[in-house]
């Protein structure tokens, strides 16, 4: 493949290539898709990476800098935005793997999220800017962006949930009471995204599956007809599932070659029970899904909410709750464990960023149209106060965000110009083209300041 | 209608005028004066603290949301604020009760919200028969799904993945109102259905001859020869068989027709065995296979249909349809309350029936099985911490108490015996299970200079130097009683490094006293200071601050007496704390610290039961043993236990309409010397379990097949 090969020509080749026999009935579709590919070149993508146990604000402070201008390494009390350019600065060792991209990063400090306060994880509150322990009470930002940036799979949510459950329901929601399942088994995630074509299932299997899904959608409709409204809802989701599996099945077939090309070879990692390998596999699957163009919004989790922080015995860190309480597991301090884990996660993120940066799209690369949001579900520490919630932003979402190497210390909690995570989420929706000026539940303790609108300083 | 029935049941009578109902009178005489006396000053026309106004509240249902807020605030003692005069307890209860009835249309769905219905409303007066609950469907549990797979295929099915999860919240898990089958689960169900049918039809064709593999369904395998497509009769018969296995009933003619049509469609692009397999998969995915249907048969008040009863009874106690219950239904002998009672009794008395859901109830109620989830550092006293073994010991103790089936609730709380480090092994000569220690220390190293890694194991945790071979064994005197002093329970309700008196207290408040504790308020950072030179009880005194105490007074004093044990669940008589003075001196010549020195601080094991709802219970206790003995004697605590059993076996919170089922179950328990079996039989034969009120049928929605 020459460097001039774009995703668009790839798609065209796919349409005329070896898959043509199998794809005959939908060739028209595919050609149309390729023809309208200028739209595709401009598509935007957002990836959330959420790691348990807090991100120490100091990990965002570049080497040689202090948290406060007076040289003290304490929580700043500024009442105006303070900005430092990252050019020429070395990132904290915890974020070192992201150094090559420091000109495309904004390190955001000082946003609060007190509404989501809990003793550990903020659960749905982290991405929902709402109370932590009331279940999925409103739509979370990842799901809102999935609506704004639809794809074959509107929202790919996967990761390592800190337990053996195949699914996690603690972080993401598409609306009140509608938790979005996060797939925590690489095998399942792979089969769901790439299985239909990458497994090499032929036309027969495809047709049989289609007939089955059609039949089941009809069958569920019949069963639900005799139920009262409240109970009917339980069958509605089952019905929606069959309908959307059926629709997706046809759509995926149009992308068969892309899927085959990008499907990651994961071998034993698909069924591993080792946390770090699960994460490696899930990052690869997520990257492949983005490259194959089957989704625009991804949520990647490490840890499962509540006290399911996860466990990394392979690194000699058997319990993340333990390090939250000072356990050092043979290191000089628990901080060393935190940094080790942070480096592991930022390496995974850097790998994903590299993949996107190496893939041409339009006149640039996929990274140009992507934003990665890295944060913790428990804000700034194991037992968070959430007056500050460190966030790392990578990429500018097609020039919509100002993330060009900036260290941003937003005005402290309680000051007049203070901004919250809800404001950040509004900004993301503005950047994605579906602006909203309110998100989640306002913080009652900030009733005297304006909590609406985007963070103006982040928008391009 | 239901609401009115309860109003009249609860409200105090009085001469009602023609214009005023008893409910109006009650509101005027008891509720409105309370609001006026205690609320309106800050929430009235002149001032609306927190933007809340209450002077305009009436009994009108449009005020439901505000009444809910009033109820919760008063019930939890959050309002009126401490600086204001405290309202009379009975008057407060009357308002809470009234508001509960007035807002009864909004039942709380989460398992931990069951106590929101005041205990007095359920047990205060003899209950009358109420309308059964509405028809519902209940997604089968993760265990139930694995049971379903075993029902479908006698052999092991390779590639099966668990499609379902349960809430990670503490407490009871499997409620009918909590779960649906969403897309990722459906995707797994479809793959699993393929795997199950593949295993049902596994075969080999050699020299044109078809032979079945092990554990297949012969009838299905016969249809796997591509050269011999099934006759219509064969196909229908196969669908019928799959229906009986997966759904538990025969398909009707209309249903059969649709499966035949599916087969026809599938054969257009594939051979006949492939099409047959697709048809068989479709049956496995039916709503009635993945959901427990509880709709009843007919309209109005109706008992569950026989196939529904088979699953209801079987899955109440186990994970799959019980063959004998299935047979009874087929013979038409599962239609009445008495017939269901006979089946439930048979299952409970059958020594071969495993009834795994019985033990699971006690695990979810006490949650001692969470001990393994609490990570701990290596204990400094050299005694092994093996939470898995601690849980096994408590499981066995629960089963032992259930086997005796006498005064079960009291025994659970106060039994002086325990299994300790207990396991069994088959004696090959006698062919009998024999008791053996669950964990054994390795033999000491012959080299006396080498220190052993461990100085003791699990039985030492309970206070035994030697492993007792006769078990259950009486525990050392005046140390432990019952499940709450089992090391497993103490560890499950501890943190990584310390005891957790707050959550232990909350557990007692909710699960034994039937009380409630509000969620952690927004903006509160709940942390006990890290100051290891002070005892935990002393450090926890931060919660005595007025703002914290209004909630913590419902928890801390109930949990503090368990300071009798350390966070590994070991009995102690003193609490080690850091000795600052000696630690400061513990340095080498260069002044470098040689480590922390600990000293014993005096241990307090006292606690208080307050505002329990049972006056006989309220008062100080000197240690945890006195606490559990007192509670074990309380009728209220016993009834709260019954309420939890109700929630578990019926998969939902109780409502006011369930008062009779609860009172009957409590009575059955008492009249049968505290038999848990009697309690379960009563619950599983109650109207609440057996009957449904069928919904009024509505016209099909647009686009819905008729």
Image (spheres, rainbow, N blue to C red):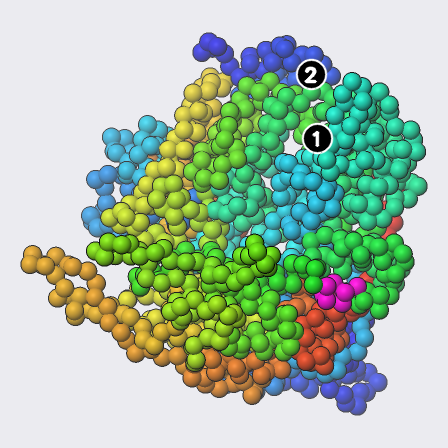
Q: Tell me which corner region of the image, top left, top right, bottom left or bottom right, holds residue B349.
A: bottom right
Q: Residue at x 51, y 28 (%)?
A: A267
Examine the structure image and report whether residue B91 is included in the region drawn in magenta: no
Q: CA distance from mark 1 to mark 2?
A: 16 Å
Residue A312: assigned label: none
Q: Tell me which corner region of the image, top left, top right, bottom left or bottom right, holds residue A118.
A: bottom left
Residue mark closest to the camera, 1 vs 2: 2
Q: Is residue B110 left or right of residue B385?
A: right
Q: Is residue B206 left or right of residue A442?
A: right
**Can the viewer see residue A5 in this picture?**
yes
Residue A247: assigned label: 1
Give how far across and how far down residue A65 sits, in percent.
Answer: 23, 41
Q: Which residues are magenta?
A: B343-350
Magenta span: predominant SS is helix
Residue beneath label 2, please?
Answer: A23
Q: Tell me which corner region of the image, top left, top right, bottom left or bottom right, holds residue A157.
A: top right
B458 versus B263 height, above or below: below
Q: Residue at x 69, y 57 (%)?
A: B318
**Can the viewer see residue B112 in this picture?**
no
B371 versus B543 height, above or below: above
Chain containing the residue with disc 1: A
């Amino acid at each position: 493949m020459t460097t001039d090969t774009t995703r668009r020509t790839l798609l065209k080749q796919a349409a005329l290539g070896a898959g043509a026999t199998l794809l005959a009935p939908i060739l028209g579709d595919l050609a149309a898709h390729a023809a309208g590919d200028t739209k595709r070149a401009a598509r935007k993508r957002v990836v959330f990476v959420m790691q348990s146990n807090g991100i120490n604000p100091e990990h965002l402070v570049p080497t040689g800098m202090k948290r406060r201008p007076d040289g003290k390494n304490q929580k700043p009390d500024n009442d105006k935005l303070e900005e430092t350019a990252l050019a020429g600065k070395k990132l904290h060792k915890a974020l070192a793997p992201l150094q090559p991209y420091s000109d495309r990063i904004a390190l955001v400090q000082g946003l609060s999220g007190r509404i989501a306060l809990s003793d550990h994880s903020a659960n749905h509150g982290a991405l929902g800017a709402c109370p932590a322990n009331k279940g999925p009470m409103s739509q979370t930002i990842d799901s809102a962006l999935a609506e704004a940036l639809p794809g074959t799979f509107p929202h790919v949510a996967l990761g390592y949930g800190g337990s053996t459950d195949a699914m996690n329901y603690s972080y993401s929601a598409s609306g009140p009471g509608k938790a979005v399942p996060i797939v925590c088994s690489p095998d399942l995630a792979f089969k769901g995204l790439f299985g239909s074509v990458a497994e090499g299932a032929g036309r027969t299997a495809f047709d049989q599956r289609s007939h089955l899904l059609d039949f089941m959608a009809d069958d569920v409709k019949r069963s639900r007809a005799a139920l009262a409204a409240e109970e009917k809802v339980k069958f509605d989701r089952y019905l929606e599932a069959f309908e959307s599996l059926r629709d997706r099945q046809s759509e995926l077939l149009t992308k068969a070659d892309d899927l085959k090309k990008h499907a990651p070879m994961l071998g034993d990692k698909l069924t591993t029970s080792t946390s770090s390998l699960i994460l490696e596999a899930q990052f690869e699957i997520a990257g492949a899904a983005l490259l194959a163009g089957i989704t625009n919004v991804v949520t990647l989790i490490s840890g499962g909410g509540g006290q399911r922080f996860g466990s990394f015995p392979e690194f000699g860190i058997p319990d993340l709750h333990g390090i939250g309480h000072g356990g050092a597991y043979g290191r000089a301090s628990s901080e060393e464990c935190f940094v080790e884990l942070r480096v592991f996660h930022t390496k995974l993120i850097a790998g994903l960023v590299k993949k996107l940066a190496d893939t041409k799209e339009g006149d640039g690369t996929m990274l140009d149209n992507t934003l990665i949001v890295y944060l913790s579900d428990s804000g700034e520490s194991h037992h968070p106060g959430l007056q500050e919630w460190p966030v790392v932003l990578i990429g500018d979402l097609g020039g919509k965000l100002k993330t060009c190497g900036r260290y941003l210390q937003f005005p402290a909690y309680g000051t007049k110009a203070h901004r919250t995570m809800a404001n950040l989420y509004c900004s993301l929706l503005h950047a994605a083209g579906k602006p909203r000026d309110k998100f989640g539940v306002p913080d009652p303790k900030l009733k005297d300041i304006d909590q609406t609108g985007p963070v103006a300083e982040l928008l391009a | 209608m239901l609401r009115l029935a309860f109003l009249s049941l609860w409200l105090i009578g009085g001469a009602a005028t023609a214009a005023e109902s008893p409910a109006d009178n009650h509101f005027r005489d008891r509720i409105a004066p309370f609001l006026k006396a205690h609320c309106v000053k800050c929430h009235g026309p002149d001032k609306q603290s927190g933007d809340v106004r209450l002077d305009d509240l009436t009994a009108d249902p449009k005020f439901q949301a505000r009444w809910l807020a009033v109820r919760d605030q008063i019930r939890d003692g959050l309002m009126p604020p401490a600086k204001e005069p405290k309202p009379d307890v009975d008057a407060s209860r009357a308002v809470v009760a009234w508001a509960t009835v007035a807002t009864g249309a909004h039942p709380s769905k989460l398992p931990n919200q069951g106590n929101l219905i005041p205990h007095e409303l359920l047990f205060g007066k003899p209950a009358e028969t109420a309308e059964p609950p509405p028809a519902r469907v209940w997604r089968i549990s993760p265990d139930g799904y694995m049971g379903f797979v075993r029902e479908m295929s006698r052999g092991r099915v390779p590639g099966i993945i668990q499609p379902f999860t349960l809430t990670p919240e503490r407490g009871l898990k499997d409620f009918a109102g909590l779960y649906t089958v969403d897309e990722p689960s459906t995707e797994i169900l479809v793959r699993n259905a393929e795997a199950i049918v593949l295993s049902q039809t596994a075969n080999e064709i050699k020299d044109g001859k078809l032979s079945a593999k092990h554990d297949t369904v012969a009838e299905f395998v016969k249809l796997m020869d591509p050269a011999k497509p099934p006759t219509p009769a064969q196909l229908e018969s196969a669908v019928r068989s799959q229906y009986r296995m997966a759904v538990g009933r025969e398909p009707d003619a209309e249903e059969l027709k649709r499966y035949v049509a599916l087969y026809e469609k599938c054969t257009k692009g594939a051979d006949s065995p492939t099409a047959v397999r697709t048809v068989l998969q479709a049956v496995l995915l039916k709503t009635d296979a993945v959901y427990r249907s509880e709709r009843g048969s007919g309209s109005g008040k109706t008992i569950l249909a026989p196939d529904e009863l088979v699953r209801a009874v079987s899955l109440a106690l186990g994970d799959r349809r019980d063959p004998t219950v299935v047979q009874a239904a087929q013979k038409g002998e599962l239609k009445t309350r008495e017939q269901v009672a006979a089946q439930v009794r048979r299952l409970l008395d059958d020594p071969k029936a495993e009834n795994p859901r019985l033990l699971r109830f006690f695990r979810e109620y006490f949650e001692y099985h969470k001990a393994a989830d609490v990570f701990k550092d290596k204990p400094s006293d050299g005694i092994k911490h093996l939470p898995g073994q601690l849980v096994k010991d408590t499981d066995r103790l629960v089963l032992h108490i259930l086997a005796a089936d006498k005064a079960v609730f009291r025994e659970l709380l106060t039994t002086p015996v325990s299994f300790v480090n207990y396991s069994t092994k088959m004696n090959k000569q006698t062919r009998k299970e024999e008791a053996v220690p669950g964990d054994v220390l390795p033999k000491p190293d012959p080299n006396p200079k080498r220190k052993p890694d461990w100085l003791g194991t699990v039985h030492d945790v309970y206070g035994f130097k030697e492993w007792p071979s006769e078990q259950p064994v009486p525990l050392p005197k005046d140390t432990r009683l019952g499940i709450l002093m089992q090391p497993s329970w103490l560890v499950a309700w501890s943190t990584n490094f310390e005891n957790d008196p707050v959550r232990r207290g909350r557990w007692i408040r909710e699960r034994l006293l039937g009380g409630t504790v509000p969620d952690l308020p927004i903006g509160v950072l709940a942390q006990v200071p890290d100051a290891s030179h002070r005892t935990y009880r002393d450090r926890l005194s931060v919660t005595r601050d007025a703002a914290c105490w209004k909630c913590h007074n419902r928890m801390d004093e109930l949990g503090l007496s368990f300071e009798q044990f350390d966070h590994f669940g070991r009995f102690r008589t003193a609490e080690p704390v850091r000795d600052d003075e000696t630690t400061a001196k513990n340095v080498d010549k260069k002044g470098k610290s040689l480590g922390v020195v600990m000293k014993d601080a005096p241990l307090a094991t006292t606690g208080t039961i307050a505002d329990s709802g049972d006056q006989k219970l309220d008062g100080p206790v000197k240690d945890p043993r006195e606490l559990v003995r007192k509670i074990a004697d309380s009728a209220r605590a016993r009834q709260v236990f019954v309420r939890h059993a109700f929630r578990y076996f019926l998969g939902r919170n109780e409502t006011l309409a369930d008062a009779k089922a609860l009172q009957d179950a409590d009575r059955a328990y008492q009249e049968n010397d505290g038999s848990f079996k009697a309690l379960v039989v009563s619950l599983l034969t109650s109207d609440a379990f057996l009957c449904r009120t069928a919904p009024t049928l509505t016209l099909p929605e647009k686009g819905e097949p008729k």
